[in-house]
Image: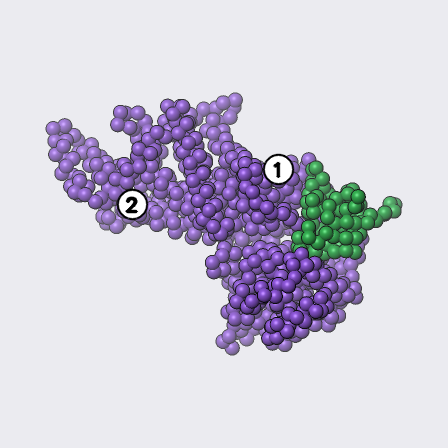
Chain colours: A purple, B green
Amino acid sequence: MSKQINVALIGNPNTGKTSVFNALTGLNQKVGNYPGITVEKKEGVCKLPRGVKAHILDLPGTYSLNATSLDENVVIELLLNKKDKNFPDLAIVVTDVENLKRNLLLFTQIKDLEIPTVLVINMADRMSKKGISLDIPLLEEKLNTKIALVSSRKNTGIDKIKELILDHRNIPTSTCVDTTVIDKTYFEGLQNAFPSQSVYKLWLVITQDINFANLDRNLVKDTSDFSTKSKSDLKRLQQKETIIRYKFINDVLKEGYKVDLNAAKGLRSRLDRILTHKIYGYVIFFLILLLIFQAIYDWSQYPMDFIDGLFATISDWTKNTLPPGAFTNLIAEGIIPGLGGIVIFIPQIAFLFLFISVLEESGYMSRVVFLMDRVMRRFGLSGKSVVPLISGTACAIPAVMATRNIESWKERLITILVTPFTTCSARLPVYLIIIALVIPDTTYLGLNVQGLTLMLLYLLGFGTAVFSAWALNKVLKIKSRSFFVVEMPNYKLPLIKNVGITVLEKTKSFVIGAGKIILAISIILWFLASNGPSDNFRNAEEIVTNQTESNNLSSDELATKIASYKLQNSYIGIAGKAIEPAIEPLGYDWKIGIAIISSFAAREVFVGTLATIYSVGSEEEDTIKNQMAAEVHADGRKIFNLASGISLLLFYAFAMQCMSTLAIVKRETNSWKWPMAQLFIMSGFAYLVALIAYQFLK
Amino acid sequence: MRFTVAHLKRGEKGIIKDISADQIPIKLFEMGCLPGSEVELIQFAPFQDPMYININGSFLAIRRETALHIEVEKVEEKPTL
């Protein structure tokens, strides 16, 4: 057996589909993207008896085959396209035993595509608690399929799934529901027009238009000629289709599924009474937010200090061990500090995703959405905007992607546009070092002034996000109905394995994604600062020595003069001088200008850039902070004073953050219009505010 | 005036009579919001919006403006002792 069996895992959200995927594949999985879109593609390999392997594709969760989002559309595109290399030999529909009825809707739709389909009934461990009993043989007969009763929590039934995968050739492909009865003449006409196609497939292609116009049109050519029905007629037919499907499901479950209603309820209603309470609900949410921030900005300090020290040691060691030369300098001054700048964010990113994934797995996130919807709607946002805005404190990129489940386009667009205002963790090193330089380390009313400044910057970011959402809501004239349906899943204890895999995956993709950019930038910067175009750069030693001959400088002073002359005549120095007039009114010199420009690749590069520029420019190795504090203007004034410091802080608070954010906004809005608007409006505003602050304070 | 899900009080139940199909997302149908289904109002957020409901075992939150399009007949329940 050399051929892999292609298996697609399909199911509603909150059915434990990912748990089943994790149980089948373990760590043999990889997360990528579907070509051209940012929908996450999770695939893995499952080892079966007799050396057979199955390729498992974990498709995005969907309630039905009527796509309402990019994620759901992936499922339909795959299932309708037999030529796709991932087209499943077997579809596994994962359902939650407590929501079997609703989950079966999707099952019947997939069965009707005549794909071999088996049913996994998950969360079997909750059956006795909820008073549910199942007649599996009867259900298998009525649904004409094979069923595996699984508990991914207790790890039972997984072997049964593997058996079914091995046996995929014997899984029936018969259909469940005859949809043509909802409008006989219409479907007959359809079939006659395209005799070679399955009529249900045709129907799916036609109706996708109502909800989501992104289907591969080549599948069925010229269906547009067949749009004899209006959109609202089609929608009414879809409602009818749903009704007959539920009728079928009710008939099936009448005998095979028994639930003792008295045994149900319990935990959910008790927890909901507190967690969705008018007052306690908000208090608890606020406390959880505090806990998250505490973890991100306090607890993670310890591992971060450790990482910082570690990289400094490695850099030092490299410099002392390797033979001196350009290559060693590149490693010690360019690559290692660059890598350190990425690794140092791992604790914060990991903490954030740990909390987000626990909150989502437990079912609590939906309650937050419920509590916040009304408040957020005042500002043109949705309850679902809460998750992106919280994620934004780590990084805007996953945050912008987390807006996908917002149904209303207007609310989603506003969320995407304002999310970059929230203070992402990459801005933290910039804030920290500037605060340390210009804000006095004293207490005011018993509170540390530096800490207060940091908190003010966070509030400023969040406040600006909300305020601009409100303004955008007034300005944007987009007609979009605010459909809002949120499932309130059962409360569950999060599975450590699932949380662990999520944290691992997200952290890995951050490190690799952001890491590549930061590493590249630090190497380029180092190169630009160590080379120059003119003879001035190459003959720096001679020129400076000649100029200062009469001054009787010590050799140390001379070396510093030479280095700084070199830097001014390097590529980076020339570029910096060119932009200096634009940033001088803000109180910055050309070195800060270079740092600002290069930090457009990623915020944390700001500190690294200054570090690179200063360490290339000086012979002695000193901490970045001391080097920055020692920088002076030609007339002896400090470069980093209160006025220029505040001006920098404000600039970073408002400016459009980085090019990765621009790229993700372009992808998610499918146009350059919005990211460009963000770039010019946000950065323009930042420039203006920084200008006013500096001119006022200087 | 039509009596809709939005007019239920906390803990009250109703049977869905009619749904304005054009005003309702297809997702809601798929979650079991169909004529004949039973709806229970579990919880309101402040200002009675959104509403947390149970339709035939599906626990959902919907906005008031959507709830106004789901006409129900109130089920009078005898208090259980």
Q: Position of residue A678 (x, y in %)?
A: 46, 42
Residue furthest to the top: A445
Res A378 label: 1
What chain letter is assigned to the residue under label 1? A
Few, some or many residues within 10 Å of mark 1 (<14, 14–19, 20+)? few
Measured in 3D between alpha carbons, the distance from the residue under mark 1 to the one under mark 2, in whole angstroms, is 48 Å
| Secondary structure of the residue carrying numbered label 2 | helix
Q: Position of residue A479 (x, y in %)?
A: 59, 46
What chain letter is assigned to the residue under label 2? A
Few, some or many residues within 10 Å of mark 2 (<14, 14–19, 20+)? many
Query: Is residue A146 something that shows in the picture?
Result: no
Indicate the amino acid at tag 2: Trp
Residue at x 36%, y 30% (from the top left corner): A586
Q: Name the front one of labels 1 and 2.
A: 1
Nearest the viewer among A691 and A335 is: A691
Which of the 4 image quadrants contains residue A598? top left
Nearest the viewer among A621 and A387 is: A387
Res A526 label: 2
Q: Position of residue A134 (x, y in %)?
A: 75, 64
Which of the 4 image quadrants contains residue A428? top left
Q: Position of residue A683 (x, y in %)?
A: 42, 38
| Quadrant (top left/top right/bottom left/bottom right) for the N terminus of chain B | top right
Which of the 4 image quadrants contains residue A368? top right
Residue at x 87%, y 45% (from the top left corner): B79
| Secondary structure of the residue carrying numbered label 1 | loop
Query: Is residue B70 something that shows in the picture?
Result: yes
Residue at x 51%, y 75% (from the top left corner): A3
Q: Is B38 located above or below residue A468 in the figure?
A: below
Nearest the viewer among A95 and A225 is: A225
Res A81 label: none
